[in-house]
Amino acid sequence: MEWILVSLASLLAGFIDAVVGGGGLVLLPALFATFPSAPPATLLGTNKSASIWGTAMATWQYSRRVQIRWRALLPAALTGFVGAFAGAWAVTVLSPDFLRRMLPFVLFAVLVYTVAKKELGRHHRPRFTGRAEWLAASAIGLSIGFYDGFFGPGTGSFFVFLFVRWLGYDFLNASASAKLLNVSTNIAALILFTAKGHVWWHFALPLAVANVVGSVIGTHMALKHGTGFVRSIFIFVVSALILKTGYDAFLR
């Protein structure tokens, strides 16, 4: 019964992740609620073991329909991998509590800016080309990758927002690009969790299958309905993240 509940949560997480990121909002709370006595690191590692497959599937699906700017994004994926490793190491020597309290306010600023700028991310007009683009994308990969390794909540949403705001992508192209970087940072995290024995592999397969199914559905919906749909889901997910991170920081 337990694996059925968390697999359903993984399916919904895969859907949300494929559209705009933020699937951890669904799967992680489900894992913590279902297994309250389990070590948090083990639940985090098990979450990564599932979400990486859905994110990889979404990346592949988007690459067939969206013109991903590989020359800029492959270096960004590499810096994201390095940043995630560095962040995971940093969390062993520094406390992320200051980020826990600051995060709801940062997300609120992102939400207000996105809602106020109604044309933000509606048109795909990349601001950079060549070296300037891969340097900017790599800076995003390194910084958000570090954040993902160090703390994590909202990583996909931050990737999407920065690709829209800084690089000039529309929400659909930003979401497609974010998936590639998310795969890279998830690989880094999964390597670390696996090395320390913090993955329940007997749950990994059903969770991964469910996550991939959700990812296929989510990617299909995003490609079918376009950037307006992705923007709406982005606003919803960021709003939910504000509530979740605010509760964790100040009320729990």
Image: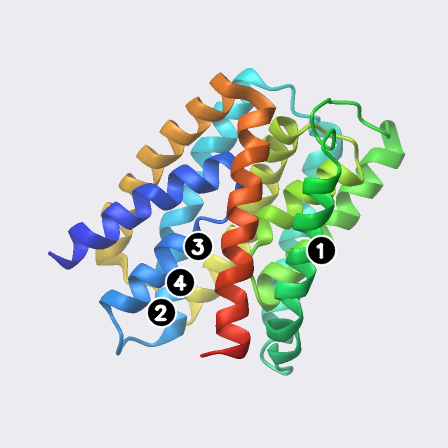
Q: Amino acid at mark 4?
A: Gly
Q: Is residue 146 visible?
A: yes
Mark 1 falls on what kind of element?
Answer: helix
Mark 4 vs mark 3: which is more N-terminal? 3
Residue on which the image places disc 3: 24
Compared with 63, 52 (above or below) is below
Q: Amino acid at mark 1?
A: Ala
Q: CA distance from mark 2 to mark 4?
A: 5 Å
Residues at marks 2 and 1 touching, judged by CB atoms closer than 8 Å: no
Mark 2 vs mark 1: which is more N-terminal? 2
Mark 3 falls on what kind of element?
Answer: helix
Residue 82 horizontal/vertical position (percent): 67, 56
Q: Amino acid at mark 3?
A: Gly
Q: Quadrant of the N terminus?
A: bottom left
Horizontal side of 244 relative to 102 (left or right) equals left
Residue on which the image places disc 2: 42
Image point 57% across, 55% down: which residue? 154
Q: Quadrant of the C terminus?
A: bottom left
Horizontal side of 131 relative to 217 (left or right) equals right
Mark 3 vs mark 1: which is more N-terminal? 3
Residue on which the image places disc 1: 109
Q: CA distance from mark 3 to mark 1?
A: 21 Å
Mark 4 falls on what kind of element?
Answer: helix
The structure's colour scheme is rainbow
Q: CA distance from mark 4 to mark 1?
A: 30 Å
- Numbered circle sitting on residue 45: 4
Residues at marks 3 and 1 touching, judged by CB atoms closer than 8 Å: no
